[in-house]
Amino acid sequence: MAYDASVLPDVTGLTVGIIGGTGDQGRGLAYRLARAGQPVLIGSRSAARAEQAAAELRTLPGMPADATISGGDNVEVASRSDVVVIAVPWDGHRDTVAGLREPLAGKVVVDCVNPLGFDKQGPYPLRVEEGSAVQQAAALLPDSRVCAAFNHVSAPLLADPEVDRIELDVLICTEERELVGLVGALAARIPGMRGVYAGRLRNAHQIEAFTANLIAINKRYKAHAGIRVTDI
Amino acid sequence: MAYDASVLPDVTGLTVGIIGGTGDQGRGLAYRLARAGQPVLIGSRSAARAEQAAAELRTLPGMPADATISGGDNVEVASRSDVVVIAVPWDGHRDTVAGLREPLAGKVVVDCVNPLGFDKQGPYPLRVEEGSAVQQAAALLPDSRVCAAFNHVSAPLLADPEVDRIELDVLICTEERELVGLVGALAARIPGMRGVYAGRLRNAHQIEAFTANLIAINKRYKAHAGIRVTDI
């Protein structure tokens, strides 16, 4: 079937927790989702920093007066959320995810981490023993429902209150087709975004790694590039 | 700077040779380029099969009466062309490219080969010792100007005479910025296509591998998917 936003499930009541929610990507996603009316919890190693980030986001332009956004430490946020986005730096990915195995059991986990290195010639993908960040998460979280998504979303666009729409597709890699609807519905809450199934977890590496290409494109064309899948 | 088609170089006089021009991808590119008025040479191990493919393409709807398209064996085509597209199956990539080192010296070589494996779960990227097909070509062709491009172009769309426009971006990986203009201008001869710089050769692997994701997308959404870079 073609992509059809009208058949997406209702996810408006789900609480989205964002582990690493004080970083650029996590904070930006938290802002966009809360701005769209989604209940959001920002997670950080420090509950105080998470609460501060939530308080700051509440004051940003575009945020509705009744936005539901607050902060807590990572374990609390993982426990209290229905869907948990992993948005930590790659350096801390393994330890952070491993430490959340119990609170994440039974939950939907969305990994948006891109393992990249940087040198004089710019960004390049790092080799990951498990194949990709999301496969590492899946291995560490056998009782969770893990997928990759939101890898290509530009943090500066997410953070810019002047930006009303973010035109790109969120590529979703998963072994569970049902997650495509759920995560796609979350993506579609952000105006301009669609969630598109893009293969199994074993094909997530190249999506994570493609962020290096987007960085090269951004530099060359002075853009905040994303990708749109054509013909769907 | 932003993407600007008006500054592309004039490539209308360049002869484009297509090694593996009797395969689906090569044949489709040959058809589209010749249909746009580009001089095209189809290369194959067998000159007779190449000539036959060229003769068949000349009779397809949309082909101008004065189209310049003919066939020859791979060595002859490599020798007589200005720009040479490598469109052979991955299995034969190393041997074919290595055998063309001399005729390809000094030429622009565009590699569009995607090293993929297939099993019951569908396609997946193969590990390539050099990192990617295009890096293998660059290592084998030290005297050529090598880039990756046209990796994501749907062969069925290329081959369908009813299709007037193919809406997608051709991602170009290269160490030579000048090639972006030249190959981008070739891509832009096909209505709907843009050529976009997408990073150095070391970041080509994920573009080649992403074809596995496009195949998954095509299956799921019954589409001939490509990608469009947003915000440029």
Image (tube, coloured by chain):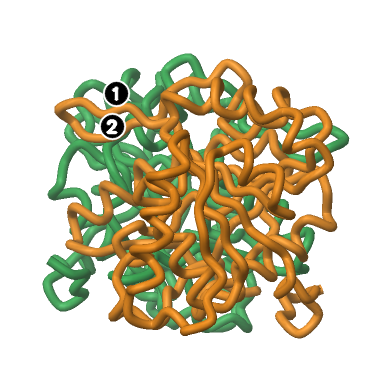
Chain colours: A green, B orange
Residue contact at pointers 2 and 1, CB within 8 angstroms: yes
Instruction: Give the residue displayed 41% in from the left and 44% down from the top.
Output: B48
Which residue is the site of mark 2? A104
For the C terminus of chain A, the image quarter is bottom left
Q: Are marks 2 and 1 on the same chain?
A: yes
Number of numbered discs on residues: 2
Whether residue A48 is situated above or below residue B12 in the rendered picture: above
Q: Nearer the viewer, residue B202 or B147?
A: B147
Vertical placement of residue B126 versus A46, above or below:
above
Residue B27 position (above or below residue A134):
below
Q: Residue at x 79, y 38 (%)?
A: B144
Could you say which is closer to the camera, residue B57 or residue B108? B57
Name the chain under label 1: A
Question: Where, by quadrant of the figure, is residue B46 drawn?
Answer: top left
- State the residue at coordinates (56%, 42%): B86
For the residue pair B66 and B227, the one nearer the viewer reads as: B66
Residue A141's tag is: 1
